[in-house]
Image: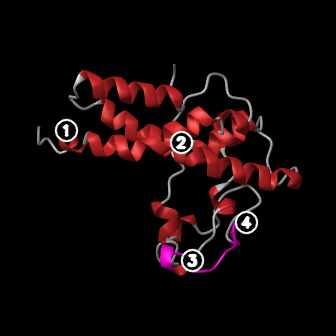
Amino acid sequence: MQLPELKEDCSRCAALCCLAYPFTAEEDFALLKEPDHPCPNLGQDFRCTIHADLIPRGFGGCVAYSCAGAGQRVTQILFDGETWQEDPDLLHHMTYALRVLRPIHEALLVLQEIAALDLPAESRAKCSALTLALCPENPKTIWDFEQDHLQEALAELPDFVETIADFALGVT
C-alpha cells in the first residue's frame, strides 16, 4: 500500500477549494460565497488574483486552508486532468469529490503522525488497519472512496485517537 500525496499542490489542481466551499465572515473570509460557486478573486488560470494580499484583504481562511493533497488527486486522478472550466458539467462532480476526499486525506495525515509514535502492538496494528482501509487500491472514481468499509474506518478515527491520546502526550 502506498499513501497518496498528502500535501497540496495547487499547480496540479483546478482551484477546487476556491469553488467547493462556502465563505463566511466567521471563517475569516471578507465576503460571503455559496458552495459550488467560484470565488470572485479566482482567475481563468485557476490562480488567485489577490494571493499576495490575502490576509490584508480579509481572506485569512484561504491562508489557513489545506486540502492535504485531495484537490490534485480529484483533478488529476479522478478526472484525468479535466477541469470544471473546460467542462462546466464537471463542476458539481468535482466539488463533491473534493468534499469526500479531503476528510480522508486529513485522516491519513493524522494516522501518519500516530504511526510515528511509540505505540503498543495492538494500537500500531489498528493504525495500520485504518490506514489500509482509507487507501483503496487503484481508485478510479469517487465511488471507490464511498465504500462502506472506507467510510466506517473514517468514522472510527476519532475514537482511535482518543485511545492513543496518552501516548501522543507522552503520558504513558
Label 4: which residue? 38
Q: Where is residue 58 in the image (x, y as percent from the top left)?
A: 51, 78
The extreme top residue here reads 1
Q: How far apart are marks 4 and 1 (CA)?
A: 42 Å
- Figure quadrant of residue 163: top left
- Under circle 1, the secondary element is helix
Say which amino acid is labelled 1.
Phe
> Crowding near pointer 3: few (<14 within 10 Å), some, many (20+)?
some
Residue at image location 69% in from the left, 72% down from the top: 34
Q: Is residue 166 magenta?
A: no
Q: Do the residues labelled 2 and 1 touch (CB within 8 Å)?
A: no
Label 1: which residue? 167
Q: Are marks 2 and 3 in contact (CB under 8 Å)?
A: no
**In the drawing, does residue 74 fall left or right of residue 117?**
right
- Under circle 2, the secondary element is helix
Q: How far apart are marks 2 and 1 (CA)?
A: 23 Å
Q: Which of marks 4 and 3 is nearer the N terminus?
A: 3
> Crowding near pointer 2: few (<14 within 10 Å), some, many (20+)?
many
Residue at image location 71% in from the left, 52% down from the top: 96
Q: Which of 67 and 156 is in front in this view?
A: 156
Q: Distance between the residues labelled 1 and 3?
A: 37 Å
Q: Main secondary structure of the magenta part?
A: loop
Give the number of the disc on residue 104: 2
Q: How many labels does the image show?
A: 4
Q: Where is residue 78 in the image (x, y as percent from the top left)?
A: 73, 36
Q: Nearer the viewer, residue 79 or 12?
A: 79
Say which amino acid is labelled 4.
Pro
